[in-house]
Image (tube, rainbow, N blue to C red):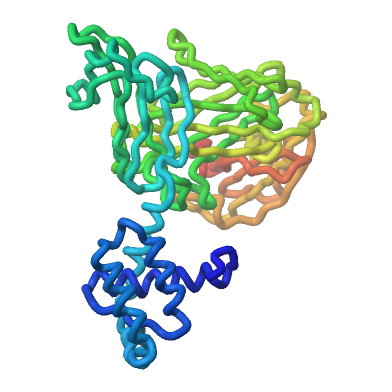
Amino acid sequence: MDLDGKENVATTNHEAKSFITALQYNSEVICSKDICPSAIHFISLLGSLVPTSRRETLRMTGCGRCGEKRHWFRTSVIKMKFLTCSIIMSVFLQLSSPNPLGFWTLLPNILVVEVNGALGQQPLSCLGSPQDGSRNDNKSQDIIWKKNGVVEEQRGNSYSVELEESKGGGNYTCHREDGSLVNHTVVLIQEKETESRKIVEKINQGDYVQCLAQNYNGEFHCSWTWHRSRDAKVAFIEVWRGSNDGDTQCSLDTSTQRWTCSSGQSNFSCSVDEHGHGISCREEQHCPYAEESKRIFVAVYMLTEDFLVENYSQQFYLAEIVKPDMVKISEVNTTMIEWSYPSSWSSPYSYFPLTFEIAQLRQGCKHCGNPCKRRETWTVQSPDILQITFKNRPKAVCVRAKDALCDSQWSEWSHLRLRGNEKKKTSAIR
């Protein structure tokens, strides 16, 4: 059988399911005339997964009677349990693939190990780098290892972290016999990229992280929603503009709790919100009047108390995420209102113009949660005169704004009630 051909590989996978299922149920493996030769080859590939006695039985009896049992085989294949085959093949493929898939250093003494769920081992070294797990001389035999403060059975310079599914992470420390600390490594587990995430929930349009900017001054905010069953925190932040050729260096200033990321193309500083639901970042030396030619990339690594780490990222131009703050509305007289640009919006307004949408409500809406929802609207664009006169005094007026030059988001509605001598009220309507 030509293992280099795609069709033959697919056939082998099909045969593998049939043979392994038969082995699981201790049934005699019967194969068709075409499958027989490749079955023998596949049995040789199984190696130690199948006991020698079973392999010999298959070789001697399974394919020795292919012709006389062909009809029985076809019937048996139809009756085989697909779920059992899938599980067995999944285990076989995991055993045949390496685990861990890779590892890299997040910060000094913090090692991220990418796993695929199979059994595996990650070597650590006490007297060298985590990659140098093979050193083991007589002087290192007195080294004691601890995982999360609990003494382990393994001794010596080398230590093997046992990996299974998403388990294996922890704080590994090595000590002399007198208890003195020699070295430590925090091992974080990163599962192979899948659709299922465990730390952060999806928000708008299927994204996990949403980033917004109030203006073009180079500041933006990214937020997320923690999964209700997870106790997690931000472990690492990486931000850059343009391409990342590995030259982006990020570090945390523990005194100010601010992250700084520097590269040959950009410099950013970020801080985590007080309650850990977002980060606020600023691009240093940002010029708001220059055209953006390269995107901003944001990567946030979330860490659980079980040492599971996940990476959530976004990329954007500021023009794509800009969302003005609410406008302020006031009443000039009985037929006129005026509003103003948000104080946080970029200036001069002639260079950063806004488009305003105005809605007037003729009917009262005393108990409505969103009186701006049902409305007749029109838009105006002006960097100077922000007033409007009504021929017939409405019950209420709503105004919102967006960048006039980009297809970005509207601000939240500002709402002003105009009911005779009742107390005027301006509020945010979502």
Question: In this view of the protein, which residue sits in the foreground, 156 or 362?
Answer: 156
**Image-quadrant location for residue 70:** bottom left
Is residue 116 shown left or right of residue 279?
Answer: left
Q: Residue at x 43, y 31 (%)?
A: 112
Percent position (x, y) of residue 174?
27, 16
Q: Residue at x 36, y 29 (%)?
A: 123
**Image-quadrant location for residue 411:** top right
Percent position (x, y) of residue 297?
62, 33
Is residue 238 shown left or right of residue 67?
Answer: right
Question: In this view of the protein, which residue sits in the foreground, 254 or 410?
Answer: 254
| Residue 385 visible in the current orientation | no
Q: Residue at x 78, y 40 (%)?
A: 405
**Image-quadrant location for residue 163:** top left
Q: Is residue 145 above or below residue 78?
A: above
Percent position (x, y) of residue 132?
42, 22
Percent position (x, y) of residue 109?
41, 19
Question: In this view of the protein, which residue sits in the foreground, 103 or 55?
Answer: 55
Is residue 384 shown left or right of residue 283?
Answer: right
| Residue 160 visible in the current orientation | yes
Q: How many marks?
A: 0
Q: Residue at x 50, y 32 (%)?
A: 300
